[in-house]
Amino acid sequence: MTTAVATAPWADRVLCTEPPGHPKWIEAHKKVLGGHDVASLLGYGRETPFQLWAKFTEKVEREDISELPWIQDGSDFEPIVARRYERETGNR
């Protein structure tokens, strides 16, 4: 008999639980597009698409963005967003 375990849809996609700026957080985010990267791809971010490409292909060193206010805000809001998601969908 097999027992199914319900998990959150994103459970297998958690990159890191360390705070922004922690070496493990930085390493986990090296090859992942974040919201700020998507904004850059769409022409609304702090970087051009070329700068983004250079960063992801390691042609240039990645900037430490952990102290940027919107990065810290995103980390602060994660528990709130997770609770809202759980309340509205019933998923944990």
Image (cartoon, rainbow, N blue to C red):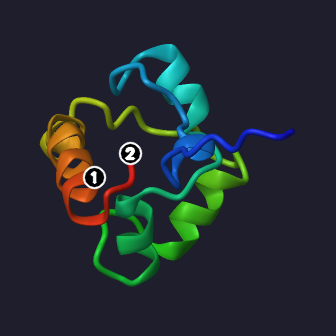
**Which of the pair 39/61 is nearer the observer?**
39
Disc 2 marks which residue? 92
Which residue occupies 60% across, 27% down? 27
CA neighbours of label 1 inside 10 A, class few (<14), some (14 to 19), many (20+): few
Q: Which image quadrant is residue 46 in?
A: bottom left
**Which of the pair 16/56 is nearer the observer?**
16
Task: Point out the tag, 2 or 1, that comes first from the N-terminus.
Answer: 1
Q: Are marks 2 and 1 in contact (CB under 8 Å)?
A: yes
**Which of the pair 78/43 is nearer the observer?**
78
Image location (x, y in percent) of residue 62? 52, 39
Disc 1 marks which residue? 86
Which residue occupies 20% across, 51% down? 81
Q: Which mark is residue 30?
A: none
Q: What element carries label 1?
A: helix
Q: For the N terminus, give its image quadrant.
A: top right
Which residue occupies 65% across, 53% down? 56
Q: 20 above or below 86?
A: above
Which residue occupies 14% across, 44% down? 80
Q: 61 above or below 21?
A: below
In the rendered structure, the answer to whether residue 20 lies left or right of residue 29 reads left
Image location (x, y in percent) of residue 36? 35, 60
Q: 51 above or below 2?
A: below
Q: Which amino acid does label 1 sit on?
A: Glu
Check the image and name the residue furthest to the right.
1
Check the image and name the residue furthest to the bottom.
42
Q: For the C terminus, give its image quadrant.
A: top left
Q: What residue type is labelled 2?
A: Arg
In the rendered structure, the answer to whether residue 1 lies left or right of residue 79 reads right
